[in-house]
Image: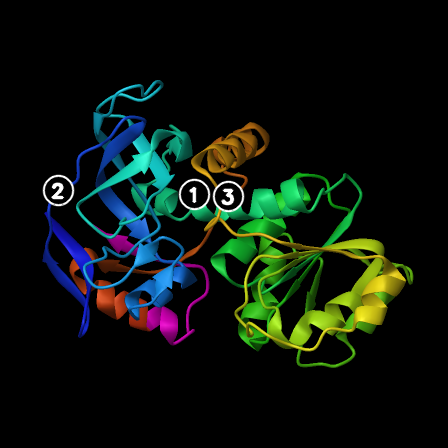
């Protein structure tokens, strides 16, 4: 099969061995795969959790048809249309833990659309509902809201009953589009007074739950914007791995600061997260109420070009590879 593989000279479109499903896994004939920020880390030769290094097939999620099932797999059969988070998704075939996979809704959802959903669904449902303990009526702020994961996060927050959803973007054009995806107040974190605007629209209380994909230099401002007993969930670090931390403000507001990642979770934990997201969100996904825009598609053979497009940070929504 063909795949986008990490080499000493960058990502190349090369021949690779076709994988076989082990017990509990399904083999997917990939029709589309979408890009995530972690793919840039892997493509540069670094590791992302257990994945990475020369010879690694890039990719974290894909959609296609079940080609074969391993032992002990229930609920899937060859021919089923599926989407799943799956290491090595930038290939003609990929294996996935059956517990991570979803059947594609029979509502005319394309493979390209389906490939955009698995990582965003499990990441944001877990950040908001699992780690973030979102309750109906809570106010929510998504840092880095113009990313694909962020756009879906705002929609999920609204769907799960958030009273007000806020999102940040430092790009003027993208910020104006956030309202299309459930955003009630779009904020520019280059404005040092953005936490004051959060307090203003929350009647002085501050925001109940922040899902932070930026970290770095916004941490203290997050705490300024947060309510007493607010929750901040650290999902990503697009703005830097380190930054100042006002420990007194953290204590004064009694904020729960929660770090999450899938890199250190067991298969059982991931399956539970996926199942919880499906229980809460699948009717809305089947009805087309939760979706993501596709910025641009590339053929699998141009995976390196697609990664360069993501690295340039010129996109809005998801970048998709078509196989």
Location of residue 139 with respect to 129 vertically, above or below? below
Tell me, what colour scheme is on the image?
A: rainbow
Rounded to the nearest angstrom, the CA distance separating label 2 from label 1 is: 22 Å
Q: Along the line of sight, which residue is nearer the eye, 233 or 290?
A: 233
Residue tagged 2: 18
Q: Select label 3 or label 2 by which is in front.
A: 2
Residue at image point 50% right, 43% down = 121
- Residue 317: quarter of image: bottom left
The picture places residue 321, in percent across and down from the top left corner, at 26, 55
Q: CA distance from mark 1 to mark 3?
A: 5 Å
Say if 295 sits above or below 260 in the image.
below
**Image: 191 above or below 265:** below
Measured as percent of width and height from the top left, residue 313 is found at 43, 73
- The first of marks 2 and 1 along the sequence is 2
Earlier residue among tags 3 and 2: 2
Q: Which mark is residue 118?
A: 1
How far apart are labels 3 and 2 at the CA level? 28 Å
Q: Is residue 212 magenta?
A: no
Q: State which quadrant residue 6 falls in.
A: bottom left
Q: Residue 130: x and y, percent?
A: 64, 40
Evaluate whether residue 74 shows in this view: yes
Observer-side mark, 2 or 1, equals: 2
């Amino acid at each position: 099969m063909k795949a986008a593989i990490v080499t000493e000279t960058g990502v190349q479109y090369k021949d690779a061995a076709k994988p076989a499903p082990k017990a509990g896994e399904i083999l997917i004939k990939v029709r589309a795969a979408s890009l995530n920020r972690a793919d840039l880390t892997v493509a540069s030769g670094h590791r992302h959790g257990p994945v990475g290094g020369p010879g690694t097939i890039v990719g974290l999620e894909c959609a296609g048809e079940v080609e074969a099932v391993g032992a002990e797999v229930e609920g899937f059969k060859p021919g089923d249309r599926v989407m799943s988070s799956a290491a090595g998704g930038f290939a003609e075939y990929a294996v996935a833990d059956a517990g991570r996979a979803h059947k594609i809704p029979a509502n005319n959802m394309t493979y390209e659309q389906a490939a955009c959903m698995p990582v965003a669904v499990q990441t944001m449902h877990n950040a908001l509902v699992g780690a973030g303990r979102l309750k109906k009526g809570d106010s929510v702020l998504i840092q880095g809201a113009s990313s694909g994961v962020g756009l879906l996060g705002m929609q999920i927050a609204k769907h799960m009953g958030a009273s007000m959803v806020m999102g940040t973007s430092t790009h003027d054009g993208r910020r104006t589009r956030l309202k299309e995806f459930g955003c009630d107040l779009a904020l520019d974190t280059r404005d040092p007074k953005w936490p004051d605007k959060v307090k203003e629209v929350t009647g002085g209380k501050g925001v109940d739950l922040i899902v932070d994909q930026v970290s770095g230099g916004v941490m203290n401002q997050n705490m300024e914007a947060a309510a007493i007993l607010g929750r901040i969930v650290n999902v990503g670090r697009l703005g830097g791995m380190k930054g100042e931390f006002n420990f007194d403000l953290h204590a004064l507001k009694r904020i729960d600061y929660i770090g999450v990642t899938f890199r250190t979770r067991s298969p059982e934990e991931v399956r539970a997260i996926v199942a919880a997201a499906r229980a809460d969100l699948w009717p809305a996904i089947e009805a087309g109420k939760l979706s993501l825009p596709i910025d641009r598609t590339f053929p699998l053979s141009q995976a390196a070009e697609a990664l360069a497009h993501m690295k340039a940070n010129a996109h809005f929504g998801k970048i998709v590879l078509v196989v």
